[in-house]
Image (cartoon, rainbow, N blue to C red):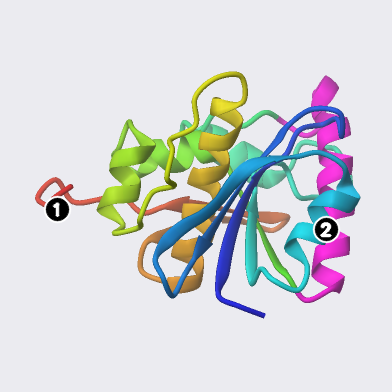
Amino acid sequence: MGSIASGLDLSGSPGRCSGYSEIDVDMRAIVRVGCLYRDEEILSVIVGRVSIVAIDAPITPEPRVRELDRIAIRMGISVLPPSLGGMRILTQRAWRLYEGLSSMGVRVIETHPRSALKNSGFKDPVDLIRWLGIKPPPEIPKGRFARDIMDAIVASLVAYCHLEGGCVEEIRASDGVLYLISRRSPSDPI
């Protein structure tokens, strides 16, 4: 297995784009971005190639409000509870993928890309990419799926930071952990 850190902005439906991004850790470069759809496609792209994937979805066996959600909300992080409407379907899908990926040796972590970006102190993902010293993708996503893919890029940066250490923060509760990117110091160059 190579040193690939990936991010998945999971959609609740296999018929909709789940943004996906991969960072080659040794090259310090984003090497793949795009949309994935069915669970089988997601598994086939990740298993055997990826060391860690950060998923933008609640990773819990039951779609219920967790202590983790309560803590995050109190901290000003705008997560949606797994028990809320469409979040139930997303949570169930995330759990199936978590079980499948984990059973095949892939480390799976939960993130919230918009909160990870905000926590980092950056407003623009491209500035965050540059600050971390990662080579951006050849083209910055635009158009219909741009937001899904940009969220996946931020999620892959969270996975990269988790793998490399030093640039990740945890919000830990008895029923889960949410990973964010550490806040940069105002004196840090972009």
Q: Is residue 82 above or below residue 153?
A: above
Using residue 24 as the reference point, say whether residue 46 is left or right of it: right
What stretch of residues is rendered in magenta? 81-105
Q: Secondary structure at mark 2?
A: helix
The three-letter code of the residue at mark 1 reads Asp
Name the residue that disc number 2 marks: 43
* Residue closest to the eye, 100 or 68: 100
Cβ–Cβ below 8 Å for labels 2 and 1?
Answer: no
Residue lying at 44% horizontally and 47% vertically, measured from the top left: 137
Q: State the residue at coordinates (55%, 27%).
A: 147
Is residue 21 something that shows in the picture? yes
168 sits left or right of 38 in the view: left
Main secondary structure along the magenta-highlighted residues: helix
Q: Which residue is mark 1?
A: 188
Does the magenta-highlighted stretch encompass residue 96? yes
For label 1, the crowd category at 10 Å Cα-Cα, with few meaning under 14, some 14 to 19 and many 20 or more, is few
